[in-house]
Image (tube, rainbow, N blue to C red):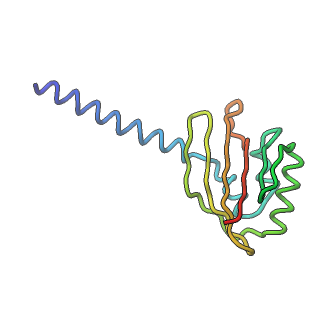
């Protein structure tokens, strides 16, 4: 009977350890990505774009090349200079992650949704959505 208790205790310990490791991996997003939003740096942000990106900014949605999306984000940051960015929720699977955040600007706050896919070992932004709060 004592042996069974040890088995259950060991299984419980492994379950707790593995679930905390999974949650750490989900929060393991590049800091430079978040910093790029905080600073309004479209060049740094574009380092995380794939070759094509689905970009939605305030009801205008299209699929753009990396260079086009960089220019659009530069225009957005000029029009709405950021003052801060905070992550609200991070989740996903090992090969795909998403981030929901809040971007504060001098002209109001925006909800930001990022969808990242693993592209040969590096997470790239596949979809970016920015909506007025």
Q: Residue furthest front?
A: 59
Q: Quadrant of the N terminus?
A: top left
Residue at 53% across / 41% down in the picture? 25
Residue at 55% across / 45% down in the picture? 91
Give residue 11's quadrant in the image: top left
What x and y, as percent, mark residue 76? 82, 62
Q: Nearer the viewer, residue 74 or 115?
A: 115
Q: Quadrant of the C terminus?
A: bottom right
Q: Residue furthest left?
A: 1
Q: How many marks?
A: 0
Give residue 52's quadrant in the image: top right
Residue at 66% across / 60% down in the picture? 111
Image position of 14 (left or right of 27): left
What x and y, as percent, mark residue 73? 82, 57
Image position of 118 (left or right of 27): right
Residue at 72% across / 52% down in the picture? 129
What x and y, as percent, mark residue 119? 71, 33
What x and y, as percent, mark residue 118? 67, 34
Q: Is residue 73 above or below residue 120?
A: below
Q: Is residue 25 above or below residue 43?
A: above
Q: Is residue 21 above or below residue 61?
A: above
């Amino acid at each position: 009977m004592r042996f069974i208790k040890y088995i259950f205790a060991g299984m419980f310990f492994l379950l707790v350890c593995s679930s905390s490791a999974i949650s750490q991996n989900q929060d393991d997003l590049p800091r430079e990505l978040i910093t790029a939003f905080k600073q309004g740096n479209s060049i740094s942000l574009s380092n995380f774009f794939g070759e094509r990106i689905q970009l939605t900014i305030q009801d205008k949605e299209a699929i753009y090349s990396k260079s086009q999306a960089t220019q659009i984000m530069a225009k957005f940051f000029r029009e709405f200079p950021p003052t801060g960015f905070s992550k609200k929720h991070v989740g996903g699977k090992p090969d795909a992650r998403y981030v929901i955040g809040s971007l504060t600007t001098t002209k109001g706050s925006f909800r930001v949704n990022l969808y990242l896919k693993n592209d040969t070992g590096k997470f790239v932004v596949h979809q970016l959505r920015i909506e007025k709060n």
